[in-house]
Each structure stands twice: as C-alpha cells, then as structure tokens.
Amino acid sequence: MSATLTISQAGPALTIQDMGRPGWRAQGLTKGGAADPVALYEGAALLGQSPELAVIEMTGTGGTFTADADIRIALTGATMAASIDGDAIVWNASHMLPAGAKLTIGGTTGGTYGYLHVGGGIASDRLLGARASHLSAGLGQPLAAGDALPLGADKSRETGLQLPRDSRFDGGTVRVVASMQTDHFTADERKRFETTAFTRDPRANRMGVRMDHDGDGFSAEGGLSILSEVIVPGDIQITGDGAPFVLMGECQTTGGYPRIGTVIPRDLPRVAQAASGTAIRFEFITLEQAITLETQHRQDIKALGGQVTPLVRDPAKIRNLLAYQLVGGAISATDNPFEEEH
C-alpha cells in the first residue's frame, strides 16, 4: 500500500516541483520546474533514486509534515532548521521519518529554496507530462495545510547518508555569455556591468530576479527599437529603469527588453539561491568556455552518488537508541566458542 504525506502546517510558498516540462515553448509555456535543479540531483543521490521524481519546494520557510507509514526523506537546497518530534536533524542528509512522527521545517538560514524529498517521490497527477507546479501558467497550486500527498513506491530503506554543502548559496561570481543584444551595449557599458557589485533585490520570484546596485542604470543603444523575440531562463534583461533582471524557470517565452547577456545554466541556481542582499558579480566568458563548464557540471552531478558519506549521529541525541544494533557479530576474547555451556 502506498504511503501518504500530510501537510499539517504550510509556509506561504510550498509547491510540488520536478525537472519541469521541456518542449512546450512553441505553445507559450516555459519549462519551469525546480528553481534549483542541482538540489534534485542531490536528493536523488541521498535516497538512491531518480532525480526525475517530484519533490516539495519550499521558499523561505517550510512547514509541518506527517506520514501514515515509515518513509525515507532527504533535505537539500537552502539550509533550514529541521526536526523530527523535536529532535534536530541534519540538512543535506537522508533520514527515516517514522509513521505519525512530526517533521518540522522552519525558515532558511542560508539560501532561498529548500527541498523535501521522499522515497518514491510525490505521486501527484501529471499535467502536460510533469508534476511540477507552474503557477504563472496556472498549472498546479501552492500546497496548503490539510493537503495529503500520495507517495510512490520506495525501492530502498537506506538512510543516514549526507553530502557536503555546496557553495552556490553564497552568491559570488556568475558567468554569462553574450546574448542577442550584447553588442547593443558599448564596450564601456559591458565593462561597467562586469565590475559592478550587485546584490539580489527583494523583488524576486520564480519568474525572475532583479539585481540592485549603486550608481546609474544600464542602457543599450537603440534599445527602444528592439522587437519582442524568444527569451530563455538565464537571459539578463535590462528593464526600463536600467536594472538587470535575470530570468528564471517560469519566465515568459518572449520579451522586448535588451539582453546584456545570458547566465550559463550551471550558475543559474547560484542566482536563484542567493538570499536578499547577497552579493553577486557577473563575468563574461566565451561560448567555448561555457561549453567546457557545462560539460564538467554534468559530470559532477552524475558523480554525486560517489560523494555520499555515512551520517554519524551523536548517540546521546538518538531518542530510540535501544532500537539500533550497535554491535553485531561480537565474540568473547576469553571464552572458547567450541566449549559447551554447563
């Protein structure tokens, strides 16, 4: 019988997400999916399952969850305070959630989007080939208290694994390649763009992230004559007030603002995960450099399973310590195992 995960309390922005819906751009629908796809690969490595399975994406804060059967969970993405029946549990790790136990996930302590994975994945209905909510397109809806989510069949019982924390939550340098209108910006303007210290503006969502900075806005020569054309996640549009706006997974499919560059896919999660006020700089690279970086990135995410290590828990903090087999196959150093007991 399949298990069910029930939401007792929900933060303001919980949605079901997966890798999204490729192939619908001609019909006006962008791919969408998890704001941080790397987190899906991390959860898959921790649970030993496919990264295509649906998860719960939590923006800023989580909620309270219970299951009607023992299930495996993993927590990845932006670090959040988490506990099971009041006992703190480690982030970026896998755990067993016993039937009826209360999983509580609080606010972020680093990053923006956190992810709750379950063994077997969330088995909600598919819409246009995916389970991901795409709220700007009217597909799916935010999760709320009282929602009961069906779970897929879990093929493993292994837990207690962890992954090292990635640096993508700390802002830093974001690599970009030239876009359709990069040449509309003067060399001095492009140089100023690279040397400007930006911070993530609070005005950000799954459609795009506005970048704040001191000084004059950016402008393109002939920017008002640009016609609307196809745009993609990662494009950096320069809006009317001169502020850069990095497009994310739920952006529109066409736009007419000039684009100074495009963030390479491997660095887009760094933009998504930057908390409000986090410092970011942009660096132009060549297309050849971008291809090399993307090739390495794909190899790295495929190798995540090899970075998983056992999660060492403090015995003093294990509530059900007597349920664990602490020593197996032990023998006496003095007794003769071949002598019969009298």
Image (spheres, grey):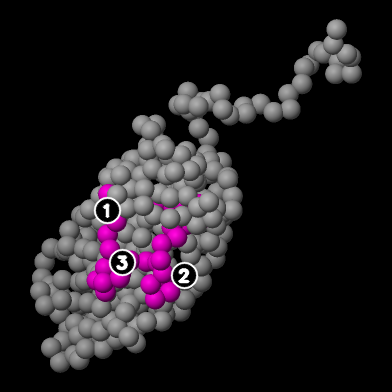
The residue lying at 34 percent from left, 87 percent from top is: 26
Image quarter of residue 340: top right
At mark 2, the secondary structure is helix
Left or right, 70 with reference to 187? right
Determine the main secondary structure of the stretch shown in magenta.
loop
The residue lying at 32 percent from left, 74 percent from top is: 233
The CA distance from mark 3 to mark 1 is 12 Å
Position of residue 240 measured from the top left corner of the image (x, y, whole percent): 11, 77
Could you tell me if the residues under marks 3 and 1 are in contact, i.e. CB atoms within 8 Å? no
Give, as a three-letter code, the residue at label 1.
Answer: Ala
Q: Is residue 45 above or below residue 159?
A: below
Q: Is residue 269 above or below residue 329?
A: below
At mark 3, the secondary structure is loop
Of the pair 285 and 97, the residue shown nearer to us: 97
Position of residue 48 measured from the top left corner of the image (x, y, whole percent): 56, 54
Q: Which residue position is annotated with label 3? A: 140
Q: Which residue position is annotated with label 2? A: 293
At mark 1, the secondary structure is loop
Label number found at residue 160: none
Position of residue 296 measured from the top left corner of the image (x, y, whole percent): 51, 67
